[in-house]
Amino acid sequence: MLFLPTLTADAPTQPKLPLSPRAADELWRALCLPSAEKRLTRFSATIAREPAFALWIAQRSAEKTPADIQTLAAWLDQEGLSQLALAEYVERVHIERASPSGEHVRLFTASVMLAKKCRAAFPHDAQAAGQAHVLGLLFLAPRILRNDPTARNSLPAWLTGLANRDSAASAASATSVIATVREIVCDLFGREFLVSSDPPQLTVLKPSLHKKIQRRWQCKRRPAEKALPQLAARLAGLRGLEDNFQNLLEQEKIAAMYALAYGAGHEFNNPLANISSRAQTLLRDETDPERRQKLAMINSQAFRAHEMIANMMLFAKPPALHRADVDLHDVLSTLKQEMEPLAIAQQAALEVQCDEIPQPVFLDQQQLLVGLRALTTNALQAANPAGVVSIRAKFVPAERFADSSLIEIRVADNGPGFDATTRRHLFDPFFSGREAGRGLGFGLCWCWRVVAMHGGSIEVDSQPNEGAEFVLRLPCGQTAD
């Protein structure tokens, strides 16, 4: 029998919850799946049959009520692998030829049965059904930990308050879903079950379900039990490398561009200045129209080359951010005023909408405008005649897997869109989807640089001939005092 790490990371002496051999086998197989969707489906199915595992995830993941089983599975896939494969756990894990007590098996059976009944109580409300399923699965957690006061006392308030209708935490969270779960518990186990501290009398368990849960705990040593911690550790390490690889690659690209830009600036700017000054000197005394045009072209191209080097230097080492509390409505209003002439010239409609933002955004307004101008210019130039470019901003509150609230800005156009090759290079400096000679190819990479400096992200959703949508997500950050 495999044991999970302790419920709380800072309590190494706390007793560990068991994980059934069947669950270890299921997790091992799920971790080997290449598809994230299939992996999450397998995780969800395992968690729904393993109340102890669900309890461990709920305790480790957050202090608020999980939305559904899929939320627990998503945390396991995103963050739980590293905690499931803690170095201490991998070294000290032990496998015993033992089964949990009969009382624990009855509690696990009752939890699974209760979860199914709670979910069935909301046949027409998927959101309520998902939450009721989780609450039913975890309702008996204090009973499961009855012999471990330290672990029981570490449970979050929302979980310990479920069974106590008289507690302040319970009264504050008495939603219709919680009330329904309590009524189902009373119908199954009696009303005294909610207030009694004695061992539960679970006499209404379905024999078929009880045997099914018992079979999950049969003491057959499985290879997966030995392999699961090491596999989780290896996959968590690979996941970390994958997450950091792109960041490291971008940092190296920017560092290389910085060295190239400053080297080019030193080597090329003097010759370019000499070419430009000579062309201007000749231009002052030249009267032939054709020669004047050629000299003017030489001068303008010298300045264009200088501008390219200057943009490279600025991209590689941009000015520091000057953050302040910013009203996003004002930013988008300014953007619309500046972009309206280009929209008229392109014969495109520019639509700007900003939903209610409950708090100021702590950003560099000027740099944000630079990035949005570049993105909007690209969208207007891509839009078809009589096309539409829409800009919408909204507030995204902090959730289970988000460290802070976000501002999401979507810029969409109905232009030709991008193929997979173009999407891969959209934010590369000097890359342009248009023909050579039109623009310097710095617009979108400027937008990416500004978003990255703010600690945000930018995504592209586009298919050929189906338009494009750029999604910017920026953390609200700490507001100024």
Image: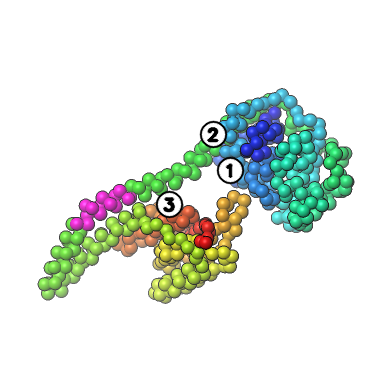
Q: Is residue 246 visible?
A: yes
- Give the distance between the C-alpha atoms of the residues marked 1 and 3, in whole angstroms: 27 Å
Mark 2 — residue? Answer: 234
Hey, which quadrant is residue 302 in on the image?
Answer: bottom left
Q: Secondary structure at mark 1?
A: helix
Give the amino acid at mark 1.
Answer: Glu
Q: Which residue is mark 1?
A: 79
**Vertically, is 191 above or below 231?**
below
Disc 1 packing (10 Å; few <14; some 14–19; many ≥20):
some
Tag 2's secondary structure?
Answer: helix
Q: Is residue 209 left or right of residue 253?
A: right
How crowded pointer 3 is (Cα within 10 Å; few <14, some 14-19, many 20+) is rated as few
In percent of width and height, residue 346 lies at 40, 72
Which callout, 2 or 1, points at the residue further toward the start of the chain? Answer: 1
- How dense is the environment of label 2, judged by Cα within 10 Å: few (below 14), some, or many (20 and up)? some
Q: Earlier in the sequence, mark 2 or mark 3?
A: 2
Q: Nearer the viewer, mark 1 or mark 3?
A: 1
Instruction: Report the residue at 41% width, 48% height from top.
Output: 250
Total residue callouts? 3
Residue at (71% x, 24% y) in the render: 97
Quarter of the N terminus within the rendering: top right
Q: Alpha-carbon distance for marks 2 and 1?
A: 14 Å
- Does residue 111 appear in the picture of this structure? no
